[in-house]
Image (cartoon, grey):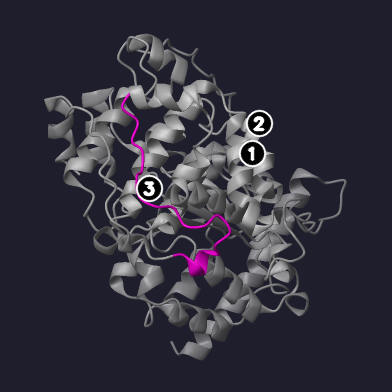
Amino acid sequence: MSGLDLEELAEIELQRDEEEAAALGAARRPSAAPSVAPPAGPDPELSTNHPFYDVARHGILQVAGEDRFGRRVITFSCCRMPPSHELNHRRLLEYLKYTLDQYVESDYTIVYFHYGLNSQNKPSLRWLQSAYKEFDRRYKKNLKALYVVHPTNFIKILWTILKPLVSHKFGKKVTYFNYLSELREHLKYDQLSIPQEVLRYDEELRNLHAGRLPPPTKTPPPRPPLPTQQFGVSLQYLKDKNQGELIPPVLRYTVTYLREKGLHTEGLFRRSASVQTVREIQRLYNQAVILKTFLRELPQPLLTFEAYEQILEITSVESSLRVTCCRQILQNLPEHNYAVLSYLMGFLHEVSQESISNKMNSSNLACVFGLNLIWPSQGASSLSALVPLNLFTELLIEYYEKVFSGRGERGAEASEQGAPGARGSVPNEGAAAGDRPASGDRPASGLARPPLPPRPLTTAWRLL
């Protein structure tokens, strides 16, 4: 079959998809005419100064937490695409690249919600072909999974058309899911940003195939934490279980090991381990020694829910005052949170000073750790929140000494617990990011080094 025939067949299948979706909606709501999915309201955190505001305001792309491997998840929702005459698809491609540029240095996952693509809003086949070609190896290498939700015959035909362009290695990353429930095995489902239209369509599909509503899910009662548990428990719990130490053992031992063995490892923190490795370390340590996982599973973020809105305002603060603003925000943290944050940021500052060998400067580290230090009390951070959250984290790392000065007794107590402290010079507070010297050009800080971790941790870390 020729390419032209396939393209015509794809158009036919897309029209059939629209008819089936309309019929399904009518069957569930016989008294109402089939409705057109309303566009998503603008993100309240999205500024009109955003370089891609004309595209971003539709909410087509969303940052949606992490998958089971700790990789950042980005969702693409077709139902939020306006008619083609209202959306510049070239701008959409540029916006997609602009978004991915913030993640491509680390492993990431894309979830594509196919429902809502129709003959009015679909991009042309030529656009799809050029889009795939423009996403070079830099984008494809660290894309670890592409999940296609609610696929149809149109998707299968489209895949056949694009197959000559798609490498075998990339093709193995694509997984199809007929129902949203199938995502639960791979992602932190509750963090996903799923449009209501997709949720409704998924329910209609399940009811159609099952013939009846599924029984309500019973949530088992929460179990008390294990005495040795390190993940998913509060900082206070860890302090009580560890003779009053402020710095949790999982954090101290991991930092100690990485300081001894990993400061010169290229891409430190950037690459994610296999799920088998993570589970084995969790089993040994309770059982785990992975910094990002530990931070993300705290019941409340290390920077606290209360600081979230303040941190989002950092981009509106004059650059010469941002370090002072960071210090003021941290003054309101609980004592324990401040001590743990100071310990972690001191270590990351040390990592950034070795960026010539490990390729992880303060900006790279901020991209990795930013969303693991703070998130909103409801849902996941929006895409527009990414810039201020990462900027705030970068300031904590880059200007560690200035940001964490002036806390007096609390800082001293953290030092007594073995918190690292950078001794190198700190650039002027008002220096722009582009004017700062490369992190790797500064001398190593010579931080105090806590005792080596127990042998089980060393054994587990070899799995990484």
* Label 2 secondary element: helix
- Depth check: 405 or 98 in front? 405
- Depth check: 207 or 381 in front? 381
Residue 53 horizontal side relative to residue 251, left or right: right
The CA distance from mark 3 to mark 2 is 25 Å
Q: Residue 308 carries which label?
A: 1
Task: Give the residue number, with chain letter if any, for mark 2.
Answer: 306
Q: Which amino acid does label 3 sit on?
A: His
Q: Is residue 90 magenta?
A: no
Is residue 342 in sight in this rendering? yes
- Depth check: 194 or 448 in front? 448
* Label 1 secondary element: helix
Residue 139 appears at what percent x and percent y?
41, 69
Q: Residue at x 53, y 19 (%)?
A: 219
Q: What residue type is labelled 1?
A: Tyr
Disc 2 crowd rating (10 Å Cα; few below 14, some 14-19, many 20+) is: some
Task: Give the residue number, with chain letter if any, for mark 3.
Answer: 349
Residue 179 horizontal side relative to residue 159, left or right: right
Q: Which residue is drawn at 50% across and 37% down?
A: 405
Q: Which amino acid does label 2 sit on?
A: Glu
Looking at the rendered image, the disc whose residue lies closer to the viewer, 3 or 2, is 3
**For marks 3 and 1 on the same chain, the one whose residue lies earlier in the sequence:** 1
- Depth check: 338 or 174 in front? 338
Which residues fall within the magenta stretch?
A: 417-436
